[in-house]
Image (cartoon, rainbow, N blue to C red):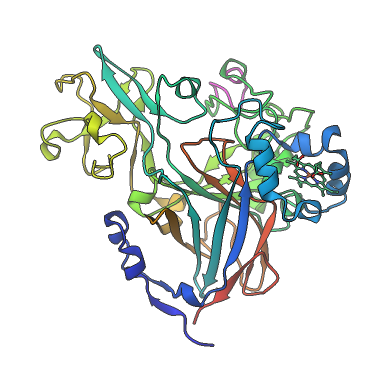
Amino acid sequence: MKTIWKMTGVLLALTPVAAAYAQSAGPDWSAVPKSEITLFYPGQASLQWIMGKDHAKGAKAIAQGRNCLYCHEGEEADKGKLLVSGGKLEPKPIAGKIGSIKVTMQAAYDKDYLYMKASWPTKDPGMYHEYAVFKNGKWETYATNRANANVAAGKLKASYEDRFSIMLGDGKSVPTYNNQGCWITCHNDLRYMPNEVKKAEIDPHPILGTAGLKKDDIRKYLPQSRTAMGENGGWDKIKSKAEIDAMKASGAFLELWQWRGYRSNPIGAADDGHVLEYRNADSGAAPFFNNWDGAKNEPRFMYNPAGNNGRGGLVESEFRNAKAPVLNEKNRVKYDPGQGWKDGDLMPKYGNQEPKGSGADNKPVTGTWANGVWTVIWQRKLNTGNNDDIALKTGERYPIGLAIHDDNATARFHHVSFPLTISIGGKGGDINAAALK
Ligand code: HEC
C-alpha cells in the first residue's frame, strides 16, 4: 500500500486562525476514499413521531429493526425540502432556510488516532456567536440565533456559530441507535419541540432542578435512561443516580462531539460530550466559557483594554468581523462596570478557553472556510482511556450520525443524517476509515 502521510500545513494555512495548529502531520487526503452524504432538515420529527400513528408503516418496520434507509434511501433532499418549508412537522419555518446539505466525508486511522475530514458548502461561514450591546446604561442582547422570535421579527440581528456534530455509539450498549439513529435522543418534551418543558416545571425536579443539575431546559436523552416513556417522552422519569452511573460505567451512552465555528475552532478543538440522561459535557473543561453573568445581567469578562485600543469591548463595525479579536483566556480581564462604556459597545457572550481532561479529546480539530466551503479536519485518539468515551477498535464498525448547524441556527434547526456506520479498516461502512502506515 502506498504511503498516505504528508504534512497538512499547506491545506490548513488558508486562514490565520488555523495556521497556528497546522504543524501536525496527518493523512494525505487525496488518497483516502470519499463518501457523499446528504443531511436533511428533520423538523419536529421526534422518536415519538417516528414510532407513532402518523408514521405507522415506518414504525412497524423500525420496531422490527429496519434502518430508516431501508425505505428512505435517496429521499433526503426531498424530505428536507418538504419539512423546511413548513409542509409537514414544522410549525415555524425559517424564511430562506435550505432543506438539505451535501457533506463529503473521509476518514483514516493509524495505531493511535482516528482522522476525519468533512467539507460542505455554506454561503456565510458561522465563525461568530451571540453578542450583547451596551444601551442606555445597561447590557442587552444584540444578536442571537434565527429561531429567536425577535430575530425573526427583525428586532435583533442574527448571529450564531456553525457546527459540525458527530454522534457515535459502540453498536451494542445502545442497540436502538443502530437503526434509529439520533432520533432515539430526540423527544417531544425537548426545547423547541411540540411539548417543550419550561424551567418552572423543571425547577422542582430532584435531579434536573434547582436542587440538582440546575437545568433551564430539556435536551437530548436516551430512552433507556428513563423508568418509563410516554407519548411525549419521559423527561422527568430519570432512573436513580446509581442506575445512571452503572450505565455510564458499562458504556451505555452515545458520544456527541461538536466542532463549533466560534466556540471551539479558534482554539483548534471540538468539544466532547455524551448523551445519557441528558446531553452532558465530558469531565474536564470544554473549549469555551460562558461570558454572561445572568444574575447581574452583565459580562463576566471584558477584553484587556491594554491590548484592545484602550477599550473593554468591541465597536459595532467589529460585529461579525473576522478582524475582531475572539475573546479568550489570554486577552480577557474581569469585567469592570466603570470602564467608560458607550452606547453601541458590543461584547461576545462566549469566549474560548483551553479544553482540559476528557473535554480535550477532540484536538486538533481545525476548520477553514474558502471559496464557499467549510473544511474541518479532525483528530481523536481511538482509545482516550476516559470513562465518558467509547474506545474505538480497528476492524470494527460503529453506528454514526452527522449533523450540521448552518445559517445562524441552534438546537433542532439543523440538518441531520439517517443512521449510518463508520468502519475502522473495513469496507462495509457508509464511511470507511483507511489504514495509514
Ligand atoms: C417501512 C418503511 C419506512 C421506514 C423503515 C421508515 N419510514 Fe419514514 N416514512 C415512511 C413513509 C411511507 C412515509 C410517508 C411519506 C413517504 O412516502 O415517504 C414516511 C415519512 C417520514 C417522514 C416525514 C417526511 C415525509 O416525507 O413525509 C420522516 C421525517 C421520516 N419518515 C423519518 C423516518 C426515520 C427517521 C426513520 C428511521 C428511524 C424512518 N422514517 C423509517 C416509511 C418508512
| Residue 320 lies in quadrant | top left
Q: Which of 95 and 114 is in front in this view?
A: 95
Residue in the image at 66% along x and 25% along y: 91
Residue placed farthest to the top in the image?
136
User: In the rendering, at what x and y percent does residue 36 appear?
Assistant: 60, 62
Q: Specify the quarter for ligand 1.
A: top right
Residue pictured at 44% horizontal, 46% vertical: 123
Q: Return the residue nearer the eye: 17 or 236.
A: 17
Query: Quarter of the image containing the N terminus?
Result: bottom right
- Please tell me which residue lies in front, 79 or 143: 79
175, above or below 53, in the image: below
Image coordinates for residue 269, horizontal then vertical, percent = 40, 53
Res 182 seen here: yes
Locate residue 202 relative to residue 226 in the image: left or right.
left
Q: Is the residue 386 above or below the residue 308 in the image?
A: below
**Residue 206: image x %, image y %?**
62, 23
Q: Where on the picture, by quarter, is residue 314?
A: top left
User: Bounds of the magenta span?
Assistant: 202-211
The kind of secondary structure the magenta stretch mainly shows is loop
In the rendered view, tell whether residue 435 sits above or below residue 390: below
**Position of 296 relative to 14 (above/below):** above
Give the residue at x 40% y 22%: 156
